[in-house]
Image: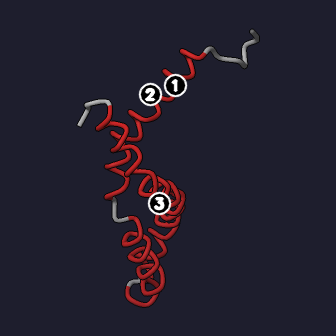
Amino acid sequence: MNETEMTDQEAKETMKEGWDILARWGKMIAILPLEDWLAAIDKADALGPFIDPTMWMQGHDKMAEIRKIIAAALPLKRAIIAIQPKIMAELEKEGKL
């Protein structure tokens, strides 16, 4: 067996670890109001130059970086929400709920 292959046991352990991570962190990520945060950032970015140009200029770059992170997390949130029923069913089957 070469270093890129794994045994059945290693594959099962990796899958179990993945489900455990998704179960723990998935719930937390799924409830984050990412869409609302993006809307608030977009609104602040659109209105900021008119309401307080100095403050907008000082915070715009940082806000743009935060927006990138939130936008990158949104597909993860959607994927987690889509598979949550399967995760919960697996955990219930294993008696972890």
Count of numbered badges drawn on the protein = 3
The outermost residue toward the right is 2
Q: Nearer the viewer, residue 23 or 72?
A: 23
Question: Which percent across, then down, holds residue 29?
Answer: 37, 52
The residue lying at 26 percent from left, 31 percent from top is: 95
Q: Quadrant of residue 51?
A: bottom left
Residue drawn at (47%, 33%) of the image: 18
Q: Are marks 2 and 1 in contact (CB under 8 Å)?
A: yes
Please, is residue 67 above or below residue 50 in the view?
above
Quarter of the image for the C terminus: give it: top left
State which quarter of the image contains the N terminus.
top right
In the picture as drawn, the residue positioned furthest to the left comes out as 97
Identify the residue at horizontal 54%, vertical 58% (top origin). 72
Q: Which mark is residue 42?
A: none
Residue at image coords 35%, 40%: 23
Q: Nearer the viewer, residue 84 or 24?
A: 84
Q: Which mark is residue 78?
A: 3
